[in-house]
Amino acid sequence: MSVTAKHPEYTASREYQWRQMRDTVNGSLAVKRRGTAYLPMPNGFKAMADQGEAAYSAYTTRADFPEIVAPSIGAMVGIVHGKEIQVDMPDALKYLWEDADGHGMSLEAFHRTITRHLLTLGRYAVLADAPASGEPFLAGYAAESIINWDVNFYVLDETYLKRDGFIWTQEPRYRVLELVDGLYQATEYEGNLGQGESITPTARGNAPMRSIPFAVANARDLSAAIESPPLIGVSDAAISIYQLSADYRLQLFMSGQETLVAINGEAPNLVGAGVVHQMNGTSDLTPDLKYVSPSCSGIEAHKEAMTEQREAAVMAGARMFENGGNAQESGEARKLRFASETANLMSVAMASCGLLERGLKGAAMLAGLNPNEVVVTPPSDLLDNTMSPADLAALFDVYEKEGMSWQTYYERGQRGGIFSTERDADTEFDMITGDFVASDEPPMPEPDARQDVDATRPITASLGVTDVVAGR
């Protein structure tokens, strides 16, 4: 038996998901560095012997990877922490506001880290620890670090980089947390991972610790169970777009590379504008000289497939990524979609707040304080997306400066309760500009310039903007 043994749920497929999420968050360079892991080599390149690797390198270089995962996560972290999160704790722990991890990270930044990890990998853990002489602090553990667990038993991979002069090497280290005879015990394994060194931590005043100051959360609740990352669908869609882009860009490249072909004759020594080449035929052979290029008949299909994947990314949670499609939804369907997306985000917010609370309670126990005095209240109004006129006006300024499309601006307004969920963006725009004609009403007369100005003034006043139709 080895301390490096992993829980049955800690499988290779879970590790692959975590690695994919990390790569797609880190962007194009991280994804392309993985080579064939995300972009298989076409069989034609494999048959090219020595030139196959060069052709594959050009293939990946031309491909575009859409940067949609990191902005989606960043936006959701901003939504969660843009609301009021109340943290109550004893005065003796107030120093954690400025230094939560013992390395100068503020408690707010530490909490954002928890939320970001839950959105990215769907798993995070917090351990309350304290030096032999000093104040308690919080230590965070990423999804991959929690390798084994059971009731009152956890194994943490703390492998780190160790510098020796100018050389850095990986140094294996593992920590086991468990209850032994009802008392909290921590055992550290380092180097050759032989016999570990055990200690029995105590609270201030040498009080015994009868619980482990450690907690794990996934994206739904406080649990060590591994679940798929909540935004794995966005990551999958981004990888699909990357693969389709590689084929699409290859076809574009090949369609512009015409090849001169000599039929029933010798190939010319020179090619280009103005070159004259004489080819002599016979009674049996008719010579011909022409440029040919691939038909690229599937290029439009690739464009459509990339559009579908973009829409899949939006539906999977990439709300910052524009959906330019024309799919129609009923008002009720929109309400349900918006509510379900926010509810998922709410579960992440609650798990994040719950994990921070458990960590602070552990710090309180180590400090000899009452852990019941620690309360972290999650934002209760995260489901309330009501947008104020001032917020809509600020958003319109972004749209007017071409920072977003009218469609995206309208969808944000719909979620904020400003625009009707029963109308699409084009209909709303036509109503604003006076081009809309209801089916049960006679056509409106053409207004003169004065009437047009008067008609738009009440709208601009209600939105708090200067020109609601400019720059569409």
Image: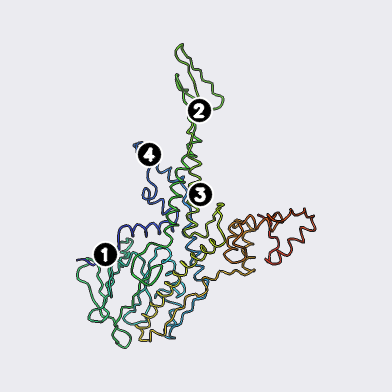
User: At label 4, which amino acid type do we have?
Assistant: Phe
Crowdedness near tag 4: few (<14), some (14–19) or many (≥20) residues, C-alpha within 10 Å = some
State which mark lies toward you, 4 or 3: 3
The residue identified by callout 3 is: 307
The residue identified by callout 1 is: 6
The relative height of residue 32 versus residue 218 in the rendered view (above or below) is above
Q: Quadrant of the C terminus?
A: bottom right
The residue identified by callout 4 is: 45
State which mark lies toward you, 4 or 1: 1
Q: Earlier in the sequence, mark 1 or mark 3?
A: 1
Numbered badge on residue 291: 2
Real-space CA distance between mark 1 and mark 2, rounded to the nearest whole angstrom: 61 Å
Left or right of 18, for residue 384 = right
User: At label 2, which amino acid type do we have?
Assistant: Tyr
Q: Position of residue 337 (x, y in %)?
A: 51, 62
Q: Position of residue 285 (x, y in %)?
A: 45, 15
Crowdedness near tag 1: few (<14), some (14–19) or many (≥20) residues, C-alpha within 10 Å = some
User: At label 3, which amino acid type do we have?
Assistant: Thr
Q: Residue most toward the front?
A: 440
Q: Quadrant of the N terminus?
A: bottom left
